[in-house]
Image (spheres, helix red, strand yellow):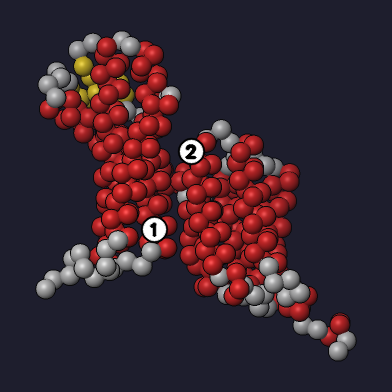
Amino acid sequence: MNRAALPLTAYFQDSKYWLFSTAITLMCLHLTLLWKVSSNFDYLSISLLFEGTALYLLYQKRDQIQVEGGPLAYLIGLTLIGLVLMRALFNPWFGPFLQITPFLGGLGLALIAGKPRQYWRELVIFALVGGQIPFSGFILKVVNIPVHAAQFSTFLLWYLGYPVTRQGANVALPTGSILVNPGCAGIDIIYVLLGLTVLFVLLVPLDWRYRLILPGIAYLLAFTVNGVRVALLAVLQASGDKLAFEYWHMGDGASLFSIVSLVGFGWVLRYFARLEPPSLLKTP
């Protein structure tokens, strides 16, 4: 047969792992750019976790990956991938476009493969990678988390016997006060635990009722642990111990509370993973 008469797919199917290798390349490119242009190590860690999970899902279906899209799908898919590569080459700063590059690259590859529905789990994960900052803005409009965190911390200090008062998001003791701003309200760790919930649901078969329970547990756990941290910061601020305050506010101490949330939620996920799907809430 004349090579010129071969269908377009024949040129792509010469390599079985062409799409898989391209996906790995795009993920590595995104993580490298984050490492170079962003000072937000937490965002880099989240991206590494999510994209690693997507890569694991792709690896599981590596034998089924084929290039079966039509000419229009090829054109759109290659255009999206080209946009990602060109922007990474000429404007690699941290911004909205860099956040959505995993989703754009993943969508482009799914279109080239011709079966976007087959890769919906991976596309959801890629969307999560760029969703942290929009999520923070959205949740602050829906729920006033700084005020709620201040309320919880005030209640906790009052219960422990401290003469504490509150006005809005300001937690005050007789010798000092702190203002709970959005950055200290625990939104980042809330997003991480909710993201882990999505990953868990995508990877582990669960009864639909468990899927409704897990996001609430994730939110309450992250909120509670961060509320304890806010209460501790209020006590340290009132005591005048600036070194201890900075350690628990911006230093390794702040990361310790995040680790506590992650470990605690890990135990929750371990419990749900060991449950038989219909056993927990099924009525006799």
Image coords of residue 135 (percent x, y): 42, 47
Q: Determine which of the numbered discs, if any, sits on residue 42 in the image.
A: 2
Task: Give the residue furthest to the front.
Answer: 274
Image coords of residue 81 (percent x, y): 68, 59
- Give the side of residue 107 with respect to residue 284, left or right: right
Q: Earlier in the sequence, mark 1 or mark 2?
A: 2
Residue at horizontal 76%, vertical 74%? 14
Q: Amino acid at mark 2?
A: Asp
Q: Is residue 2 above or below residue 22?
A: below
Residue 166 in view: yes
Residue at horizontal 56%, vertical 33%? 39
Q: Quadrant of the N terminus?
A: bottom right
Residue 143 in view: no
Residue at horizontal 42%, vertical 57%? 199
Residue at horizontal 86%, vertical 82%? 4
What residue sits right under mark 1 in the picture? Answer: 200
Q: Quadrant of the C terminus?
A: bottom left
Out of 265 and 100, give the one closest to the viewer.
265
Q: Determine which of the numbered discs, if any, sits on residue 89 in the image.
A: none
Image coords of residue 255 (percent x, y): 41, 32
Out of 210 and 267, give the one closest to the viewer.
267
